[in-house]
C-alpha cells in the first residue's frame, strides 16, 4: 500500500510540476512586467514634465496633462502585457476597449471638443489671466482658464463661464494684448469756427497730456459726416491700455470746452 501511494504521488508530481513551474514563471514574469511598467510610467511622467517645463510659455496645467497621458498610456500597455503573460488573448480586449472608447468619445463629443480647444488655448495663449477680451459679443476680464472652460468677469462684476469650444471657434478681441491702444473721437464743428486755430489748439492739448504717447503721434483732422456731410473734427491719440478710460474722458471734456470757447469767440466777433 505505501508503494502504491508513493507511486501515485510521484506520478502526480511529475504531472503537475511542469504546470506549476510554468505558471510560477508566468506569475514571476507578470510581476516583473508590472514592476517595470510602473517604474517606466513614473519615469516617463517625470521626463515629459521636465522637458515641457523648459518649453517657454507652456502652462503648468498642460505639463501635468501631457505627463498623465504618457503615464496612463504606458500603464495600459503594461496591463495588456501582463494579461498576455497568462496566455490571455489581448486582441479581442483591445477591440473591445477601442469600441468602448469610441462610444465614450461620441457620448462626450462636446466635452472632448472643449478639452481640445482648452489645450490649444493653453498652448498658443491668445490671452492671459487679467486680460480684457471680447468673445462672441461677451466682454470681460479673464479670471481663469481651465481645460474645459474660460471664466470671464464683466465690468459690472458678473461671472460668465464660456466653454472653450466657443472661445477657440470664434473671433477673439484682446484689448490688453498690446501695451498701447488708440482712441478716436469725433466732434461736430460749425462752419463759422476758425479751423486752423481749432486744429492748433487741439494738437496743443494732445501734446500737453503726459499720458498720450508720442509714437504713434496724435492727430487732429477734418472729415465730412457720411450721413449729413456735416463738418467733423477727428481726434486720434494713443495711450497705454490702463489709461484708456481716463484719457478718453479728459479728451472729450477738453476738446468740447475748446470748441465751445472758439465758437463763443467767433460769435462775439460777429456781434
Image: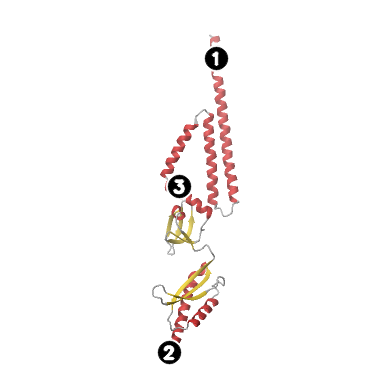
Which residue bears the numbered disc 2?
Answer: 270
Determine which quarter of the picture holds residue 212.
Answer: bottom right
How far apart, in angstroms, are the residues tagged by discs 1 and 2? 132 Å
At 58% across and 47% down in the image, what residue appears?
49
Seen in the picture, residue 72 relative to 117 is either above or below; the reply is: above
At mark 3, the secondary structure is: helix
Which residue bears the numbered disc 1?
Answer: 11
At 44% across and 38% down in the image, what residue appears?
100
At mark 2, the secondary structure is: helix
Task: List x then y, in percent, for residue 32.
Answer: 58, 32
Which of the two labelled residues, at mark 1 and mark 2, occupies the earlier sequence position?
A: 1
At 44% across and 85% down in the image, what residue appears?
264
Seen in the picture, residue 9 relative to 36 is either above or below; the reply is: above
Task: List x then y, in percent, for residue 235.
Answer: 49, 74
Which residue bears the numbered disc 3?
Answer: 112
Which sits in the foreground, 137 or 32? 137
Foreground disc of the pair 1, 2: 2
Which sits in the foreground, 4 or 201? 201
* Badge 2: residue crowd in 10 Å (few <14, some 14–19, many ≥20): few
Give the quarter of the figure containing the C terminus: bottom left
How far apart, in angstroms, are the residues tagged by discs 3 and 2? 73 Å
Amino acid at each position: 500500500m505505501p508503494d502504491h501511494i508513493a507511486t501515485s504521488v510521484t506520478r502526480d508530481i511529475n504531472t503537475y510540476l511542469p504546470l506549476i513551474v510554468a505558471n510560477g514563471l508566468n506569475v514571476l514574469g507578470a510581476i516583473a512586467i508590472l514592476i517595470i511598467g510602473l517604474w517606466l510610467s513614473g519615469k516617463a511622467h517625470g521626463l515629459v514634465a521636465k522637458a515641457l517645463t523648459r518649453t517657454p510659455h507652456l502652462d503648468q496645467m498642460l505639463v501635468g496633462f501631457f505627463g498623465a497621458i504618457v503615464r496612463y498610456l504606458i500603464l495600459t500597455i503594461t496591463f495588456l502585457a501582463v494579461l498576455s503573460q497568462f496566455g490571455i488573448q489581448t486582441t479581442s480586449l483591445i477591440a473591445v476597449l477601442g469600441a468602448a472608447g469610441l462610444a465614450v468619445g461620441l457620448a462626450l463629443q462636446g466635452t472632448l471638443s472643449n478639452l481640445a480647444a482648452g489645450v490649444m488655448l493653453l498652448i498658443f495663449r491668445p490671452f492671459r489671466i487679467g486680460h480684457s477680451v471680447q468673445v462672441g459679443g461677451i466682454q470681460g476680464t479673464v479670471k481663469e482658464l481651465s481645460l474645459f472652460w474660460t471664466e470671464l468677469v464683466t465690468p459690472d462684476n458678473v461671472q460668465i463661464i464660456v466653454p472653450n469650444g466657443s472661445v477657440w471657434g470664434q473671433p477673439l478681441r484682446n484689448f490688453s494684448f498690446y501695451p498701447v491702444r488708440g482712441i478716436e473721437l469725433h466732434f461736430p464743428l460749425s462752419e463759422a469756427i476758425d479751423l486752423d486755430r481749432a486744429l492748433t489748439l487741439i494738437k496743443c492739448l494732445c501734446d500737453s497730456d503726459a499720458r498720450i504717447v508720442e509714437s504713434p503721434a496724435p492727430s487732429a483732422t477734418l472729415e465730412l459726416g457720411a450721413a449729413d456731410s456735416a463738418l467733423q473734427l477727428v481726434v486720434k491719440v494713443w495711450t497705454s491700455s490702463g489709461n484708456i478710460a481716463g484719457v478718453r474722458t479728459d479728451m472729450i471734456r477738453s476738446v468740447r470746452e475748446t470748441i465751445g470757447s472758439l465758437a463763443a469767440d467767433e460769435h462775439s466777433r460777429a456781434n
